[in-house]
């Protein structure tokens, strides 16, 4: 680099600008007037009244480097790329073949180097120099920052895994400065990670041991480095497991003529097929009519209404039975099945009596028969005496 700068100084010194002979010089201005000066005095030389400010610019934007020189007189200003030893401009002329670089100046005091559509390769030190002997210069740094970008080919896509297995989500991002990467759920909820409830996990890898259905969600990989905008990618995590079923009330009661609702809750992924069956195993279809009941009904009336509502991997099932009749009492089964398994649950519908209690079949043992000669509630005669009394009554009637 030093040799390049020496070569530049030599190039500038060869230009018919300034000749130095001992203590006295003759500087021919552009108007042809000779100026004598004493270059032993520091004030006679060009000087830089201020430093070249370091510039930070986002890739793709335009950059401007400013160099201010006082007392330039007949000397010349050049811009040099330090790290590549490239001469960019000499005084009014742009030397580089880079079409993105241009030059402007103001009253031969302020010299501006323009770089359009800045690229990462433009990052580095730039020198503004004057062809004095020895050369005088100032340097400024052009920092090129790059907003974060996620590398799709090295980042996880949507995943489907079995419950209780381990899962690893990876997110790779580039940018300058190097991006900071974190993971969080899109819905903002906390989740279980390494035995703790967390909201954010730092780092490129999200590794979950023994994943459960509670981990099922959309996850955001977020990359940021202080250069706007931050960027994110959504990764959908789905956890497969066989159906699981819960019943809030396994025994329901109703009066004749009343409407009643039976409830069942299921969890499954893939989404399960859910339906109701009667005690005989017949599938109940919403809007169907039960022909087993002899009581008259209006034409086109619906007996059953089956309702199902989904919330993620959870499903709510309800069977509404209208105008309950004697034939409606019994057991009803809610069924859930998917590709991984099947489960069901039974709800028993019983009739209320007039006191508001269930009329249930008695499970008590039969009453104990009274032994001969025993008393139960009132006095009873022994068996021989009973036969004698009957015989006397018969004789009285015959007479």
Image (cartoon, rainbow, N blue to C red):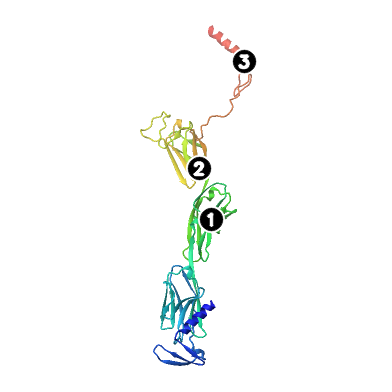
Describe the element under mark 3 as helix, strand or loop.
Answer: helix
Give the spatial CA distance, label 3 vs label 1: 95 Å
Check residue 170 in the rendering and tell me which mark sits there, or answer none.
1
- Tell me if I can see residue 19 in this picture: yes
According to the image, label 3 marks what residue?
Answer: 383
Q: Of the residues under marks 3 and 1, which one precedes in the sequence? A: 1
Q: Position of residue 183 (x, y in %)?
A: 53, 57
Q: Position of residue 353 (x, y in %)?
A: 49, 33
Determine whether 178 is above or below 397 in the image. Answer: below
Q: Of the residues under marks 1 and 2, which one precedes in the sequence? A: 1
Q: Of the residues under marks 3 and 2, which one precedes in the sequence? A: 2
Splitting the image into 4 quarters, where does residue 107 fall?
bottom left
CB contact under 8 Å: marks 1 and 2: no
Q: Nearer the viewer, mark 3 or mark 1?
A: 1
Residue at the top extreme, as displayed: 399
Check residue 266 in the rendering and tell me which mark sits there, or answer none.
2
Give the spatial CA distance, label 1 vs label 2: 32 Å
Describe the element under mark 2 as helix, strand or loop.
Answer: strand
Mark 1 Cα within 10 Å, few/some/many (few <14, many 20+)? some
Mark 3 Cα within 10 Å, few/some/many (few <14, many 20+)? few
CB contact under 8 Å: marks 3 and 2: no
- Tell me if I can see residue 50 in this picture: no
Q: Position of residue 387 (x, y in %)?
A: 60, 12
Please tell me which residue lies in front, 354 or 230.
230
Q: Position of residue 303 (x, y in %)?
A: 41, 35
Q: Residue at x 49, y 59 (%)?
A: 151
């Amino acid at each position: 680099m030093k040799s390049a700068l020496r070569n530049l100084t030599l190039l500038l010194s060869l230009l018919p600008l300034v000749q130095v002979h001992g203590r006295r010089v003759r500087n021919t201005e552009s108007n042809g007037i000779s100026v004598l000066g004493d270059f032993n005095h520091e004030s006679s030389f060009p000087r830089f009244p201020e430093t070249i400010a370091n510039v930070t610019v986002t890739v793709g934007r335009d950059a401007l480097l400013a160099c201010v020189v006082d007392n330039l007189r007949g000397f010349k200003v050049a811009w040099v790329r330090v790290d590549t030893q490239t001469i960019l401009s000499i005084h009014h002329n742009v030397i580089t073949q880079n079409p993105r670089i241009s030059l402007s100046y103001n009253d031969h005091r302020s010299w501006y180097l323009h770089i359009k559509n800045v690229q990462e390769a433009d990052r580095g030190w730039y020198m503004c120099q004057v062809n004095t002997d020895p050369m005088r210069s100032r340097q400024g740094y052009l920092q090129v920052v790059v907003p974060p970008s996620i590398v799709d080919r090295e980042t996880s896509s949507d995943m489907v895994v079995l419950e209780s297995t381990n899962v690893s989500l990876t997110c790779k991002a580039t940018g300058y400065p190097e991006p900071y990467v974190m993971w969080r759920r899109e819905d903002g909820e906390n989740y279980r990670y390494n035995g703790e409830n967390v909201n954010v996990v730092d780092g490129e890898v999200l590794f979950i041991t023994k994943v459960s259905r509670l981990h099922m969600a959309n996850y955001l990989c977020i990359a940021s480095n202080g250069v706007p905008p931050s960027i994110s990618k959504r990764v959908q995590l789905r956890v497969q497991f066989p159906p699981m079923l819960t019943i809030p009330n396994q025994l329901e009661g109703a009066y004749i003529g009343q409407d009643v609702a039976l409830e069942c809750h299921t969890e499954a992924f893939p989404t399960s097929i859910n339906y109701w069956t009667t005690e005989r195993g017949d599938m109940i279809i919403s809007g169907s009519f039960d022909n087993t009941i002899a009581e008259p009904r209006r034409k086109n009336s619906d007996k059953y209404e089956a309702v199902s509502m989904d919330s993620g991997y959870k499903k709510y099932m309800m069977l509404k039975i209208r105008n309950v009749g004697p034939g409606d009492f019994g057991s009803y089964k809610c069924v859930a099945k998917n590709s991984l398994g099947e489960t069901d649950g039974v709800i028993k519908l019983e009739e209320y009596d007039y006191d508001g209690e269930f009329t249930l079949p008695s499970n008590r043992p039969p009453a104990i028969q009274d032994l001969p000669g025993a008393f139960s509630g009132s006095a009873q005669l022994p068996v021989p005496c009973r036969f004698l009394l009957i015989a006397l009554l018969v004789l009285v009637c015959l007479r």
